[in-house]
Amino acid sequence: MKKISKPLQGIRVLDLGHVLAMPTCTMQLADLGAEVIKIERPGTGDDSRYFGPFVHGESAYFMSINRNKKSMTLDLKQEKGKKIFKELVKKADVVTENFRPDTMEKLGLGYKDLKKINSRIIYASICGFGHNSIDRQRPGYDIIA
């Protein structure tokens, strides 16, 4: 049986998204063949791991929007975590996140920082109230969306 190639095969995505907005986007990229590496906080992981319903002790919500992804934990607040992330960026095509605006810049991992590591990196960011609105620092979560 011949293996069918998918349109995004060969594309590597580093997914820092959490809960719903960005994980849904990267789920679609993974479904289209991209290698998506979901990066979560050590210890607790993505908040959606704790959303029901649960199937065999795992969140069906989390599993549904993170299908076809690889997963790892990194503490981006620690230098070791940042160093590992920067090494991953060297071999990535896309970095995605849905933090509040300026979060990645405060970590030293904003688009301008990553572009110095990998000049062809694509950086995708989603936030609840837009990056340039007066409410930009407000979290956009759950029913607000």
Image (cartoon, rainbow, N blue to C red):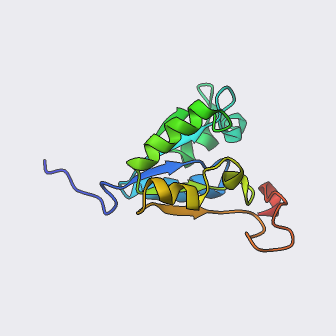
Q: Please identify the residue farthest to the left as the structure is shown.
A: 1
Q: Relative to 84, does residue 108 appear above or below in the rendering?
A: below
Q: Relative to 52, does residue 126 appear above or below in the rendering?
A: below
**Which image quarter is the C terminus in?**
bottom right
Which of 52 and 144 lies nearest the eye of the viewer? Answer: 144
Q: Please identify the residue farthest to the front as the structure is shown.
A: 116
- Residue 21 appears in the picture as rendered: yes
Task: Tell me the residue at 55%/45% (across/down).
Answer: 64
Task: Tell me the residue at 58%/52% (across/down).
Answer: 23
Residue 135, horizontal then vertical, whole percent: 86, 68
Residue 4, horizontal then vertical, whole percent: 22, 55
User: Which quadrant of the structure image shows residue 24?
Assistant: bottom right
Q: Relative to 74, does residue 25 appear above or below in the rendering?
A: below
Task: Tell me the residue at 63%/25% (across/down).
Answer: 57
Task: Tell me the residue at 65%/63% (across/down).
Answer: 126
Which of 34 and 111 lies nearest the eye of the viewer? Answer: 111
Residue 118, horizontal then vertical, whole percent: 43, 56
User: Which quadrant of the structure image shows residue 46?
Assistant: top right
Residue 122, horizontal then vertical, whole percent: 47, 63
In this rendering, position of residue 18 left or right of residue 71: right
- Residue 69 appears in the picture as rendered: no
Q: Please identify the residue farthest to the bottom as the structure is shown.
A: 133
In this rendering, position of residue 131 left or right of residue 57: right
